[in-house]
Image (spheres, helix red, strand yellow):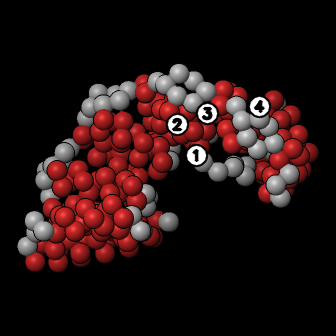
Amino acid sequence: MKRLLLALLLLWPVSLIADFQAGLDGYNRGDFETAYREWLPLAERGLADSQYNLGLMYENGKGVPEDDAEAVKWFRLAAEQGIAEAQYNLGVMYDNGKGVPQDYVEAAAWYRLAAEQGDADAQYNLGLLYRNGKGVPQDYAEAVKWYRLAAGQGDADAQNNLGFMYYKGRGVPQDSVQAYAWFNVAAEQGHKKAAENRDVAQKRMTTAEVAEAQKLSRGLFERINKKQ
């Protein structure tokens, strides 16, 4: 799940900024009751960041009893206002059947909205749904598309999965050089499975191919780091 939203405070009236900040200060010092007391009126007035933050509090049982259905309620209100983090979290709730009946179609719909706003976690999860044919027709090319977008933002799981798609030739032509490169980028972030996959891929490669893959990997890593 995503972290708290800090809000675009400059867009709000001064009185609301003070209330939101009081809630944020309370949350950060572990005074969740104060955070809830400050954010609830803002959320009820339709302020999406407060709605989202309340959803997190209900999901995690901070300052309120843990209540997945209530978390879904607040995530949905924020998601409908276009908050990508809320759209992603609502997708997760549908994906896992938390607070709502499990529904992969709904999960895919909410992931897509967040993914189209550039949310890497949503892009990765949408890729998983396409790979497995859950909530959407199985489509390896679409899975690769969303993995690639998340991988380009530094998501190690997406990088590993993209490497696997190249290794197996699913949704893309089989390419051990590309597979090794993406496995290696993920491994550089400490992804143990990617390191194992890289070593397996290397056994099928020539010395020249490994050298090419390592060069490609360095370029990918530098490009990704520049974006972050």
Q: CA distance from mark 4 to mark 3?
A: 12 Å
Q: Earlier in the sequence, mark 2 or mark 4?
A: 4
Along the horizontal axis of the image, is 7 left or right of 173? right
Q: Earlier in the sequence, mark 4 or mark 3?
A: 4
Along the horizontal axis of the image, is 192 left or right of 204? right
Task: Give the quadrant of residue 191.
Answer: bottom left
Q: Does residue 109 appear in the picture of this structure?
A: no
Contact? badges 3 and 2 (CB < 8 Å): no
Q: Amino acid at mark 4?
A: Gly
Q: Earlier in the sequence, mark 3 or mark 2?
A: 3
Task: Give the quadrant of residue 47.
Answer: top right
Q: CA distance from mark 2 to mark 1?
A: 8 Å
Q: CA distance from mark 2 to mark 4?
A: 23 Å
Above or below, 154 against 22 in this view is below
Q: Earlier in the sequence, mark 4 or mark 1?
A: 1
Q: CA distance from mark 3 to mark 2?
A: 12 Å
Above or below, 159 against 181 in this view is above
Mark 3 against mark 1, which lies toward the viewer? 1
Circle 2 is placed at which residue position?
Answer: 92
Circle 4 is placed at which residue position?
Answer: 46
- Which x, y percent locates residue 223? 38, 69
Q: Residue at 8%, 73% (x, y): give it.
A: 206
Above or below, 173 against 67 in this view is below
Q: Secondary structure at mark 1?
A: loop
Q: Amino acid at mark 1?
A: Met
